């Protein structure tokens, strides 16, 4: 299953950097309501769960980015699909 459109970060440092990027540019992202993944705003369906409902609220995106950035490694996808 391709994951090019999902956040590729695998280490806490990378995730923190991505989180910072998202916090700085929340308009470029959105949150999947199916699995809570932060995905690029341009995608039509979630690359993780193929959901098509998204939360584009800036505050929600920033909050989710900070949550992701603070988590210990592990895959965003596997964890969020549980
Ligand atoms: Zn999803």
Image (cartoon, rainbow, N blue to C red):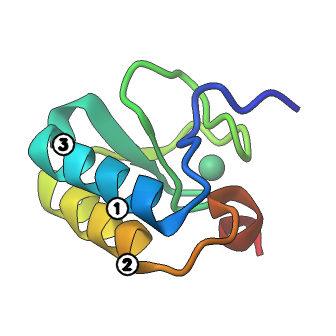
Q: Is disc 1 in contact with disc 2, using a CB cutoff of under 8 Å?
A: yes
Instruction: Looking at the image, tell me whether mark 3 or mark 1 is earlier in sequence order.
Output: 1
Q: Is disc 3 in contact with disc 1, using a CB cutoff of under 8 Å?
A: no
Instruction: Looking at the image, tell me whether mark 1 or mark 2 is earlier in sequence order.
Output: 1
Q: Nearer the viewer, mark 3 or mark 1?
A: 1
Q: Position of residue 71 (x, y in %)?
A: 48, 79
Q: Is disc 3 in contact with disc 2, using a CB cutoff of under 8 Å?
A: no
| Label 2 packing within 10 angstroms: few (<14), some (14-19), many (20+) | some
Q: Nearer the viewer, mark 3 or mark 2?
A: 2
Q: Which mark is residue 16?
A: 1
Q: Residue at x 58, y 38 (%)?
A: 6
Q: Position of residue 26 (x, y in %)?
A: 18, 42
Quarter of the figure with the C terminus: bottom right
Q: Position of residue 21 (x, y in %)?
A: 23, 43
Element carrying mark 1? helix
Taking the image as shown, residue 26 lies to the left or right of residue 15, namely left
Which residue in the structure is indicated by mark 3? 26
Choose top left, top right, bottom left or bottom right for residue 5.
top right
Q: Residue at x 70, y 57 (%)?
A: 77
Vertical comparison of 15 with 46: above or below:
below
Considering depth in this image, is 24 or 39 the residue closer to the camera? 24
Taking the image as shown, residue 68 lies to the left or right of residue 50, namely left
Some atom of ligand 1 lies within 8 Å of the CB belonging to the residue at label 2 = no
- Distance of label 3 from label 1 (alpha carbons): 15 Å
Vertical comparison of 53 with 61: above or below:
above
Which residue in the structure is indicated by mark 2? 70
Q: Which mark is residue 60?
A: none
């Amino acid at each position: 299953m391709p994951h090019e459109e999902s956040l590729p970060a695998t280490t806490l440092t990378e995730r923190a950097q991505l989180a910072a990027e998202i916090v700085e540019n929340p308009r470029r992202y959105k949150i999947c309501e199916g699995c809570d993944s932060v995905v690029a705003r341009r995608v039509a369906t979630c690359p993780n769960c193929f959901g098509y409902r998204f939360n584009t609220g800036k505050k929600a995106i920033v909050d989710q980015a900070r949550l992701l950035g603070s988590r210990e490694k592990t895959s965003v996808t596997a964890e969020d699909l549980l």
